[in-house]
């Protein structure tokens, strides 16, 4: 972990504590650090224009002035008529005279317009003013004077036929323009994204009630879970072990995936591996190596000697059981009476198949 | 009658740049509506631009041109106050003529 992310972690932990203490905290928590913002600092920062036109600067601008400013500052990205969708989505288009009358853009409901333009969606003219003043032009935000913003806004509104070509927009008549915005009735606040109290209690939203109203499907619920599809084994670990990738807190635990081969090995060891374990258990491996001679011959040597003989299995079973001497030298193989017949058979078969570990 | 065109003409150094935004559905005749019926073709076929009664641009449009077409062109000559007239005719016989003064 880098030092930077450690600092972040510390901030997170500190932040959680601070949140708990927040009501009691205020300024005195950091004695001697910082100072209250001055009035002019707040003024420079507080530039928003709200839907009720709080914060709207005084000024005026005509459509004709707006044309000039538009050509200089705006047309290169937005097109001469606000129609371009090359850099941004179109500003103008998709609204009709009917929309201006009803205050609801019909194309949004029917889906007729090929694309949603700004004037189709925006319900408040103050938002346009605020955004142009705050963020435009892209290369030099906040460089436009209030009169220039009024003029540019007048031109945009004229392009959508909200205001006539000889119109002069000002802080005095902008409320009348709001009454002609094509989508002024298109905004709803009756959904859970609006913060604060619901409309009944003096707020604007619905009090944070979620949008989902899943009434229809909350009956005739199935009593048993029936799994109808699952990832095939080969795809189980496509994203590694899911269990390791989930937090150890909370509701969700990842499934143990890992590689399917390992999973199988754990669950049911292969026959060869089981026989190898058996050979270890019965002491065979003390004298015989899988691929080398220890006291007696290696299993590879035995295999080489008896390979191809049809009676090899029976012969070897008898030798293991009774013991023997002379075939591989003077050291005798003791009789293996303590090993069950079927186990001897299993071991011999395993040897003749190559004494594989897997 | 279709909505008016938006035309802007600006003269600079003896060249006039004209930009036109037409308001037209420009239906190709290839699309189908929600019930599966073909939407009949409806598009601009001819466009003429005149500068003081002299034709400076004559164009044939087709169904491949987008809805609400935007057209920009330049011609030599033209001075402030001159008249630029743009007109179009579509395949249903509708037409529209709008004029603007060169700025």
Image: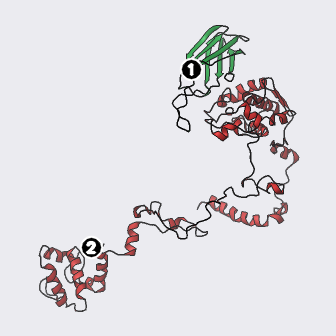
Q: Quadrant of residue A138?
A: top right
Image quadrant containing the C terminus of chain A: bottom left
In the displayed structure, A110 sits above or below B70; it is below
Mark 1, Cα crowd under 10 Å, few <14 / some 14-19 / many 20+, is: some
Q: Position of residue A44 (x, y in %)?
A: 82, 43
- Identify which residue, A288 or A317, lies in the foreground: A317
Helix, strand, or loop for circle 1? loop
Foreground label between 1 and 2: 1
Q: Colour of chain A?
A: red
Drawn side of residue B69 relative to residue A178, left or right = left
In the displayed structure, A313 sits above or below B55; it is below
Q: Residue drawn 62% across and 27% down?
A: B68
Chain appearing in green on the rendered image: B
- Identify which residue, A292 or B66, lies in the foreground: B66
Q: Position of residue B19 (x, y in %)?
A: 65, 20
Quickly name the residue at label 2. A356
Q: Quadrant of residue A306?
A: bottom left
Residue A32's disc is none
Residue A294 visible to the viewer = no
Q: Position of residue B70 (x, y in %)?
A: 62, 24
Q: Residue drawn 64% across and 62% down?
A: A6
- Identify which residue, B29 or A20, lies in the foreground: B29
The subunit carrying tag 1 is B
Residue A75 visible to the viewer = yes
Residue B91's disc is 1
């Amino acid at each position: 972990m880098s030092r930077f992310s450690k600092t972040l972690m510390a901030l997170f932990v500190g932040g959680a504590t601070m949140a708990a203490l927040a009501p009691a905290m205020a300024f005195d928590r950091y004695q001697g650090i910082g100072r209250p913002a001055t009035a002019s600092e707040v003024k420079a920062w507080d530039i928003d224009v709200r839907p009720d036109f709080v914060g709207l600067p005084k000024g005026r601008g005509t459509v004709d002035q707006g044309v000039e400013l538009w050509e200089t500052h705006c047309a290169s990205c937005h097109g001469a008529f606000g129609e371009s969708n090359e850099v941004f989505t179109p500003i103008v288009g998709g609204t009709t005279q009917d929309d201006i009358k009803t205050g609801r853009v019909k194309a949004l409901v029917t889906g007729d317009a090929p694309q949603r333009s700004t004037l189709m969606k925006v319900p408040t003219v103050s938002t346009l003013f605020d955004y142009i003043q705050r963020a435009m032009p892209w290369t030099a935000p906040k460089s436009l004077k209030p009169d220039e913003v009024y003029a540019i806004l007048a031109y945009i509104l004229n392009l959508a036929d909200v205001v006539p070509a000889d119109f002069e927009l000002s802080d005095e008549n902008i409320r009348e323009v709001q009454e002609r915005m094509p989508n002024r009735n298109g905004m709803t606040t009756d959904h859970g994204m609006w913060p604060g109290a619901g409309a009944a209690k003096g707020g604007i939203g619905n009090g944070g009630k979620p949008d989902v109203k899943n009434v229809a499907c909350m009956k005739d619920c199935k009593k048993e879970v029936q799994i109808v599809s699952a990832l095939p084994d080969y795809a189980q670990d496509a994203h590694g072990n899911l269990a390791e990738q989930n937090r150890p807190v909370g509701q969700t635990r990842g499934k143990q995936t890992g590689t399917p081969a390992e999973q199988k090995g754990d669950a049911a060891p292969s026959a060869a591996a089981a026989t190898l374990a058996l050979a270890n258990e019965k002491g065979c491996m003390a004298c015989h190596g899988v691929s080398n001679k220890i006291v007696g011959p290696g299993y590879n040597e035995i295999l080489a000697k008896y390979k191809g003989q049809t009676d090899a299995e029976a012969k070897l079973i008898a030798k293991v059981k009774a013991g023997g001497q002379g075939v591989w030298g003077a050291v005798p193989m003791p009789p293996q009476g303590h090993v069950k017949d079927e186990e001897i058979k299993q071991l011999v078969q395993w040897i003749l198949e190559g004494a594989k570990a897997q | 009658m279709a909505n008016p065109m938006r035309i802007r003409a600006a003269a600079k150094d003896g060249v006039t740049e004209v930009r036109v935004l037409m308001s037209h559905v420009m239906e190709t005749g290839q699309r189908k509506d929600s019930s599966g019926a073909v939407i009949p073709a409806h598009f601009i076929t001819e466009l003429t631009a005149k500068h003081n009664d002299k034709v400076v641009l004559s164009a044939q449009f087709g169904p491949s041109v987008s809805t609400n077409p935007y057209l920009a062109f330049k011609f030599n000559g033209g001075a402030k106050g001159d008249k630029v007239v743009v007109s179009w005719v579509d395949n249903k016989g509708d037409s529209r003529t709008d004029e603007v003064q060169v700025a």
